[in-house]
Amino acid sequence: MTESVPPREIIGAALRRERARSGLSLSEIARRANVSKSTLSQLESGSGNPSLETLWALCVALDIPFAGLLGEPRPRVQVIRAGEGPAVPSSQADYSAALLSASPPTARRDVYSISAEPGGRRLSDPHQSGVVEHVVLGTGRALVGLVDEPVELRPGDYISYPGDLAHVFEALEPGTRAVLISERT
């Protein structure tokens, strides 16, 4: 059984991570959020007891959504194997749906049907900054993902990876088919 991490520690880790991402100093974030530097330091160490208002002000100063302080950071590469995603069954039929990726409100997505055969790698140069690609393999087997770390997928497997880095799709079996979603934020 895994122990749950106290919310203060999750918030502290998120504040440290987001401050490092922003490139701003502790003093600058505290100034922008109108909180004391010592308060921010305590929160980052996981020892503070913040109010909702303080956390909201820090989110504004860091330019992140409130959920960014409570959730895990989005992984750079995510793989969901067939049958492993959290599925919700229908009461009307033998049918279930699993949410693989929620769309941000400002995202634009293109959906492609991919047909590939063994014998060659489809190497893609990086796309525009912020592009993320999502692939669900329907049939066959394929190596998919970042050029230097592709993942072997089997039918029903899902992968997402930054499309603004060089990536690859290589069919390993005849009749390999997939759905690819290219998302631009």
Image (cartoon, rainbow, N blue to C red):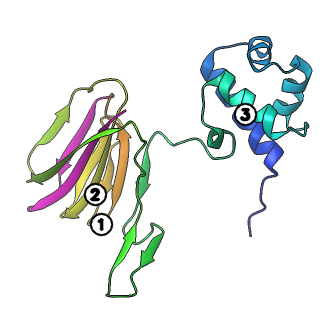
Q: Earlier in the sequence, mark 1 or mark 3?
A: 3
Secondary structure character of the magenta stretch overall? strand
CA gap, disc 3 and disc 2: 37 Å
- Which residue type does callout 2 highlight? Val
Residue receiving disc 2: 136
In the depicted view, which residue is nearer to us: 148 or 16? 16
Residue occupying the point 65% across, 39% down: 66
Residue 100 horizontal/vertical position (percent): 40, 58
- Which residue type does callout 3 highlight? Trp
30 relative to 147, above or below: above
Q: Which residues are magenta?
A: 165-185
In the depicted view, which residue is nearer to us: 164 or 62? 62
163 relative to 117, above or below: above
The reply to whether the C-beta atoms of the residues labelled 3 and 2 are less than 8 Å apart is no
Q: Secondary structure at mark 1?
A: loop
Residue receiving disc 3: 56
Q: Earlier in the sequence, mark 3 or mark 2?
A: 3
Q: Which mark is residue 156?
A: 1
CA gap, disc 1 and disc 3: 39 Å
Q: Secondary structure at mark 2?
A: strand
Q: Which mark is residue 52?
A: none
- Which residue type does callout 1 highlight? Gly
Quadrant location of the N terminus in the rendered image = bottom right
Residue 152: image quadrant is: bottom left
